[in-house]
Image (cartoon, rainbow, N blue to C red):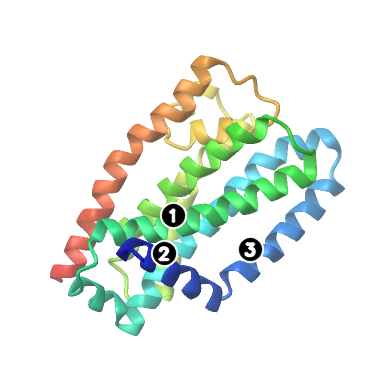
Amino acid sequence: MSRLAATIATDVRLQLRNGFYLATAFVVVLSILLLRWLPADAAILMLPMVILGNVLTNSFYFMSGLLLLERGEGTLVVHFVTPLRDDEYLVSKTVTLTALSLVEGLAIAAAVLGVGTWLVTMAAGIFLAAVLFCLVAVAVVVRYDSINEFLMPSVPLTCLLLLPVLGLLGVGPAAWYWLHPLQGPLLLMQPDAPHSAALLAYGIGYPLICLIPAYYWSRRALDRARNA
């Protein structure tokens, strides 16, 4: 087994042991019940917002929790002196948490609206949002020592990350949100949106570009944590 594959398997066991998958299953059931209780038009409007909120939890907060847990147990320091590269460390956690977000989001969408080709674009939106949330979480959380220190400062940051939701609710002109890296993924999560070639190019291409600085930001944060 390769070093990366072994790291992914370890992260899966860690997430299972800490109840991440059980919590996700509970959220899936609750979200489905809530959305199916709503009128059809309201469910279609709320679906991308519910999924994006769940992706935020599964990626940003779960990633933050894992890093803080490893810091508290001393395993984060151990990582810095093992042959495991920072890239492999980031990829392992990002892959596992993004996969969790994809399974959860697509299960909710299919249970509420059925199966259709729109699930492909929704999967793309979930994937891009989850990866971005994971990288931002790593960049931010390594400067904190405990979850209590992190929670309050994380609130304004998550509000900023979820800003395009206001556009979906009709707050302000849509053009206000086009520079936000989560605007594209949120548009891709809308089951009733006309996914033209131009929209797909923006919804996928722009977030991919934004992932580049997010990746280097997270790598620099790990470097600072190593040298602290």
The image position of residue 8, as x and y in percent, is 41, 64
Q: Quadrant of residue 141?
A: bottom left
Q: In this orientation, does residue 154 appear?
A: yes
- From what the image shows, is residue 27 above or below residue 46? below
- From what the image shows, is residue 209 above or below residue 201? below
Viewport quadrant of the C terminus: bottom left
Q: Is 149 left, or right, of 143 in this rendering?
A: right
Name the residue type under label 3. Thr
Where disc 1 sits, the SS reads helix
The numbered mark, 1 or 3, whose residue comes first in the sequence reads 3
Determine the residue positioned at 86% across, 48% down.
37
Q: Quadrant of residue 17?
A: bottom right
Frontmost of labels 1 and 2 is 2
Residue 24: mark in rendering: 3
Where disc 3 sits, the SS reads helix
Q: Which residue is mark 2?
A: 8
Viewport quadrant of the N terminus: bottom left
- Residue found at the very far left of the displayed protein: 227
Distance, label 1 to label 3, CA atoms, is 16 Å
Distance, label 1 to label 2, CA atoms, is 8 Å
Residue 19: mark in rendering: none
Q: In this orientation, does residue 189 appear?
A: no
Determine the residue positioned at 45% across, 67% down.
151
- From what the image shows, is residue 220 above or below residue 147? above
Badge 3, how many Cα within 10 Å: few under 14, some, many 20+? some
Q: Which residue is mark 1?
A: 95
- Tell me whether circle 1 and circle 2 mark residues in contact (CB < 8 Å): yes
The image position of residue 206, as x and y in percent, is 39, 28
